[in-house]
Amino acid sequence: MNLVTIGFFLGIVGLTLIVTYIAAKRTSSASDFYTAGGGLKGWQNGFAIAGDYLSAAAFLGVSGAIALTGFDGFFFSVGYVVANLVLLYVIAEPMRNLGRYTLADMLTARFNEKRIRGVAATGTIIIVILYMIAQLVGAGALIKLLFGIEYWMAVLIVGVMMTTYVLFGGMTATSWVQIIKAGLLLFGTTLLAFLVFSKFDFSLIKMFDTISTQHGDQFLVPGMKYTSSIDSVSMMMALVLGTSGLPHILMRFFTVKDAKTARSSISWTTWITAIFFSLTIFLGFGAMHFVGIDAIKLENAAGNTAAPLLAEFLGGNILLSFIAAVAFATILAVVSGLVLTGASAISHDIYGEILKDGKLTEKQQVIAARIGSISIACVSIVLALFAQSLNVSFLVSFAFCIGASANLPVILYTIYWKKFNSNGAVAAIVTGLVSCLVLGAMGPNVWNPVEGAAILVGEPLLKLSVPAIITIPLGFLAGYLGTVLTQHKVEAKKSKEIYQEIRVKANTGVSVSDVSH
Amino acid sequence: MANVGTLNKPVEKEVKPVVNNVKFKEINYKKIDQMESFNSFVKKKNTFLFGVTAAFLSLYILLPILAFTPVLQQKWIGNITGVWVYAAALFVMTVMLCMLYTKMAPKFDKIAAEVLAEYERDGGR
């Protein structure tokens, strides 16, 4: 660690704290806290959503995966980019028109039952914690590597920072941290990619020739990581459909004033992510060629430091320090968004709406939100400290799997299916959630005959690393069966009236301000 | 009395939703839901949305399927194999469909506004 590194590092910390200070002055109500008062502009929210997409797993993980496994790593890039279209075409606008703070708010706009809120909030908390453990463990390892700080201290630093942003600045601070980070990350990646491309004389043909002749054709086709079509199809399904079911992404649609702004947000996100993930090819191939596979593996077996190592090769210590600082900002921003989402489920859904029947005053709601933020942060930090030696990066794809299997079916049915009922909703969420957890626990990420390769030693019962290909159809099927098997004629009239209202609101955006209350 | 109060808690304050700068005191959702113009609008919109969604999801999921077949594993341009070209095409598709949506959406907004204008013209009840 040297002065330049410390300078960039402190610069990031300082900038984000200033943002938090300004945001804190504007955060007084529950709506300020959870949704930045719904006042973000389209481009701002677009950058913030892109910030959520471009997690450390995406920036460091994908470029490392391409460096080590070639095309197999690029599957992720394609999945993240196309996922934008699902959000844009079927989710974003109805979500904005029907929801308020959380996914559960949107579902209870149709089914005003505490059990719906309960299962939806539980799903959100599980996704948030899984995602956060993966991010925190990755962050700890990365900071240890880049700055030479002990793992437990690195996790604590990140933990304290994320709690500070959320506690004082709520969604406004979290959004701006995301926006700043997305901008920095886009700039850093473009710079790295440009430098790599210039070394190949700005010729794609030449870059691929070099990889083919000096590293081998196996990097140009899939098969190094994914050996079967079915495993990669399953993973790709989780990515493209799971994004639309991730609570921290869905929550971002409530930070804008109407469906039109939600639309322009995701349009911005599409462009940003399409550019960013195209550039991962240059980062991956650049690291493979200039740093070398052996050197990457020596630093980190999973390749997570491929991008920083490439930066060091291309621009020496200054560029390394900059990219490391951007990676740090990336981690901080993503975990802050997760803390806020977790807090919304605990404090708004479970405490405010279920336990207190939605009768909290504005002031009590903000206090509850802050207590919820501290709780979820503490739980995650403790779990991350225990998970240090485990390989937990797969938890991110698990979060996508649960999003696609538990949340997406119920969201789509709620918006688009007239007959859907609350029993179907509970069945879909519970089945999606449980099947992901059970099948995941039987899979190769948890069980491996080689000691240390996974959490437990033994033969996996299920060969799929991400069980989405089974669990997504199960989630949809459970929602369908739960509905058709329990059609009660008595409630039919009332539920029909509510669906009429949902349908009109979702399609016209009428009376957005009045939705769940 | 319209159906506003049937959802969740009873409405405590007077509701004045704003649509296209038109203020409604209350909204009769049942009536809008049964309007012919509304239903043909929703049908048209959903056909477009789900049609495009089905198409891009099919093209997308073909990538991991075809990627393990000789078709996409061959070298197409220089040493660039089919998988990269197909993946790049999916990126281009994403951006183009995003532009298509942003072009179509204002048209749907306009029809939605017309439906609400019709509802208002008929007295809003």
Image (cartoon, coloured by chain):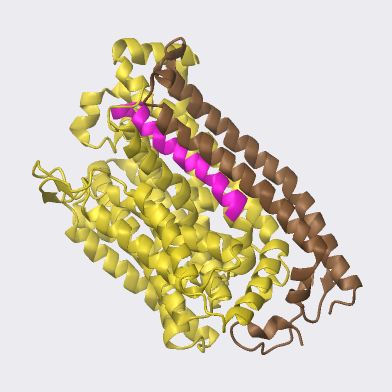
- Residue A70 vertical placement versus B106 (above, below): above
A2 versus A129 height, above or below: above
Q: Position of residue A98 (x, y in %)?
A: 61, 68
Q: Nearer the viewer, residue A383 or A95?
A: A95
Q: Is residue A77 magenta?
A: yes
Q: Is residue A336 above or below residue B2?
A: above
Quadrant in which the C terminus of chain A is drawn: bottom right
Magenta stretch: dominant SS? helix
Residue at (51, 89) in percent of width and height: A359
Chain A rendering hue: yellow
The magenta region covers A66-90
Q: Tell me the residue at 54%/84% (across/down).
A: A362
Chain painted in brown in the figure:
B
Quadrant where the N terminus of chain A lies? top left
- Measured along the vertical axis of the image, is residue A215 above or below residue A351? above
> Which of the 4 image quadrants contains residue B12?
bottom right
Q: Depth check: give the residue in front, A392 or A487.
A: A487
Instruction: Give the residue displayed 72% in from the left and 58% down from the top.
Output: B42
Q: Is residue A450 magenta?
A: no
Please give the name of the residue rendered at 59% of the width and 63% of the height, measured from the top-left corner. Answer: A415
Q: Position of residue A414 (x, y in %)?
A: 55, 66
Taking depth in this image into account, of A354 and A2 the one nearest to the observer is A354
How many discs mark residues in the rendered view?
Answer: 0
x then y, percent, for residue A487? 51, 75
